[in-house]
Image (cartoon, rainbow, N blue to C red):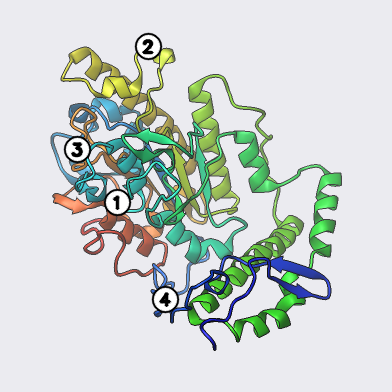
Amino acid sequence: MNSKWMISRRTMLRGAAGAIALPLLDAMVPGSVAQAASALPAAAGGAAGAARAAIPTRMAFVFIPNGVNVKEWFPQTGDDAEFELTPSLQPLKEVKDEITMIKGLTLDAARAHGDGPGDHARSAAAFLTGAHPYKTAGKDIRLGVSVDQVAAAKVGEHTRYPSLEIGLDKGQIAGNCDSGYSCAYVSNISWRSEASPMPKEIDPGAVFDRLFGPQDAASIESSLRRLKERKSVLDYVLDDSKKLNARLGKSDQHKLDEFTTSIREVEKRVERARQQNLTAPKPDVARPEGIPEKFADHMDLMYDMLALSFRMDVTRIGTYMIARDGSDRTFRELGISEGHHSLSHHGRDPQKLEAIRKIDLFHIERFARFVEKLKATPEGDGSLLDHTTIMLGSGICDGDRHNHNDLPILLAGRGGGTVKPGRNLKVPDNTPLCNLYVSMLEGMGIKTDRFGDSTGPLKGLA
């Protein structure tokens, strides 16, 4: 192939019944020389594990901002089944046997590493990626793939949606939100690629529509008719694609392959949606209307949507961002008029610490309600909670210190037998949080040697 061969940026793949615009290729850039691409890295997660049980395993991640009141969070006495719930964790008393407290985990990628201020942005960005964000407030954001999306890429084909991303505040995507870090870092915990966050939905009704589609007969019939008539555009342009591919350099061949593969994936999902619209059971709850005025009601409804998505097996992977990191939301329904972020810089002020404890307690109350709902949902010989692992935590421990070690992390559920709950698990100081993610991936049947800065699976979890 002639490395000087050029094609127009307007080039399209054409066929008898369709045309598709191409992504930017090296061969479209004047003066570029197509480079031989090195072998692509093995997909994170490796091959799926042994044959899955009839009942699927799910996992979810719940993010709370600004750290916690440390003294009122971590159990101070006892170990394993003998630990006592602290004041902030009292709402979990009915499901204590389903909870694993973990102390000693660290998110090293959230530390400055020479980048100066910006702990809130790094906390959210690194939380599920284990990657240090490139400091920019522009479009050149760079991070890494999050653990939920690694899992979604492996098990997502079994459900209508590979993953679900929800939250309670939309947050900005562009601009400077924390000391020179892009708002995209502050506002997202789920990342499909190093430059592509997964946008979260904050409207419970919109989540319902996304998960289950139209509910009235006329809309369902219309939707099915459109899906049935849809044909793969690539079927028409396949010959043109092959001819073009033969003239491209290896780098462009990889780009074209990724491009056509992504379209195939979309069309597979469309076909899967068509089949599932015909056969999937409809939800036995009413569609939520609008965003509730009370914050607690909003939070509960989004938890309900996550629980429903797992129960209906619409997805098996979920992320729930309670608020962007650095959020200064007031909690007037708790009698707290000062913003959460402002309070987190407490300077050991007893009144501010008590306000933080009340906010922590509120977060755990809503979480406990969600966990109890999963436990009360029968599945197989046990409950939905038996086959689920939910991690709740923050990328900051003490908001006043902005430290990223000894993170407030807890798990709920048994992960299909891969987690032994009812314990206060103390791991060596500075154990990477990503070790927990390696274990959670393995609990989903996804074998992986490494994720982020992991050094292996988290010891003692099972």
Q: Report the Cα–Cα distance between label 4 and label 1.
A: 22 Å
Amino acid type at circle 4 is: Leu
Amino acid type at circle 1 is: His
Label 3: which secondary element: loop
Label 4: which secondary element: loop
Taking the spot 85% from the left edge, 52% from the top edge, the residue there is: 221
- Which image quadrant for residue 195? bottom left
Residue under numbered circle 2? 337
Callout 3 crowding tier (Cα within 10 Å): few <14, some 14–19, many ≥20: many
Residue under numbered circle 4? 40
- Which image quadrant for residue 161? bottom right
Q: Report the Cα–Cα distance between label 4 and label 3.
A: 36 Å
Label 1: which secondary element: loop
Callout 4 crowding tier (Cα within 10 Å): few <14, some 14–19, many ≥20: few
Q: Residue 132 carries which label?
A: 1
Give the vertical position of 355 relative to 149 (above or below).
Answer: above
Q: Report the Cα–Cα distance between label 2 and label 1.
A: 34 Å
Callout 2 crowding tier (Cα within 10 Å): few <14, some 14–19, many ≥20: few
Image coordinates of residue 81 in percent, x first then y, are: 22, 44
Image coordinates of residue 381 in percent, x first then y, are: 48, 55
Q: Are marks 1 and 3 in contact (CB under 8 Å)?
A: no
Quarter of the picture holding the C terminus: bottom left
Q: Which of marks 4 and 3 is nearer the N terminus?
A: 4
Label 2: which secondary element: loop
